[in-house]
Amino acid sequence: MKIAVCGGTGFIGSALIEHWLEAGHEIIIVTRRRPERTLGHQLQYISWDELELNPQRIGGVNAIVNLSGESLNQLWTKSAKHRIIQSRVGSIAALAKAIEQLDKKPEVIIQASAMSIYGTSETEEFDESSPNRPTDFPSRVTEQWEAAAEAFQGIGVRLVKLRISMVLGHEKGALPLLKLPYRLGFGGRIGSGRQWTTWIHIADMVRIVDHCLHDKSISGAVNSSAPTPVTNDEFGRTIASVYRRPHWFSVPSLLIRAALGEMSIIVLQGQRVVPKKLLDHGFTFLFPDLKQALEDLYAKEQSD
């Protein structure tokens, strides 16, 4: 297959492209700045500016995966909020404009989204049928993100909106930062510890994208998460168990709010999200259990 990946140089994109190159697919990476050298016919880079000038650069692709979007992990100043929103909405608009000019449209577009669209709760469980609840900045961003993606359906292409949870990898993603306090001997729960943590192993994240690419019966929202979310306290205890470190140092909510301001929502509140659509479509997880996932990542870390 021929696949275009927008935002293909990030954590998820890099793992996805490695997987698809090994499978023999032809990949086009759309990025802000392309490297001076390309790696041959199987892997090509184009810039967003080049795509705007010549949309036919992605002509003939079977699928497009759009992972573009500035990270939420920064202080949410007014300018930062604007950049975060525009990086998502703007990439979709640019991509939709390019696709409209193609003689042959791709069969599917897989658009990144986020589980924050459900809002936060310590008691509710969310699946793809749950309503959107834009109660804070992350949920409002995601709602705008998905609303912009409806432009793809107007083109007549199958659209999958991946509501991505916290992705765990041994070198990148959230895990290196989360395990750091444990390595220093100060690991423990954050705030009450009752807030839910919904997660996914990077290997399963890649497999989910690949599954959605090939399963033509899947469309709309898809929760990209393991089937077993855990509380913040349980997540920390599992890290402590796998890395053989103590779990004792609790970080008060007031301290987190003082340090992070509005961004404290990310660590002090959470969602219990389950991947109902994937399970209904027969997807099987390599790492459905958190301890199993962390043990695999720990083994990879030790072998590097």
Image (tube, rainbow, N blue to C red):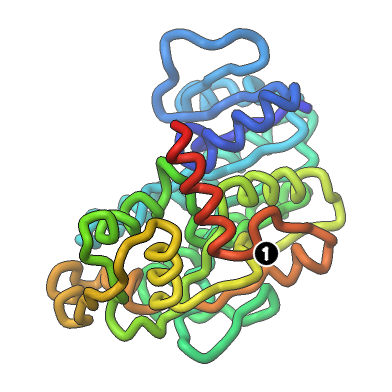
Report whether 109 appears left or right of 48: right
> In front here: 141 or 26?
26
Instruction: State which quarter of the image contains the N terminus.
Output: top right
> In front here: 222 or 54?
222
Q: Residue furthest bottom?
A: 123
- Figure check: 109 above or below 185: above
Report whether 223 appears left or right of 240: right
Report whether 173 appears left or right of 16: left
Observer able to see residue 32 = yes
- Figure check: 205 above or below 3: below
- Figure check: 134 above or below 56: below
**Point 77% across, 58% down: residue:** 284
**Point 29% across, 75% down: residue:** 190
**Point 68% across, 73% down: residue:** 128
Residue that numbered label 1 is attached to: 221
Q: Quadrant of residue 24?
A: top right
Observer able to see residue 148 = no
> In front here: 168 or 93?
168
Residue 159 percent coordinates (x, y)? 72, 53
Instruction: State which quarter of the image contains the C terminus.
Output: top left
**Point 52% across, 11% down: residue:** 38
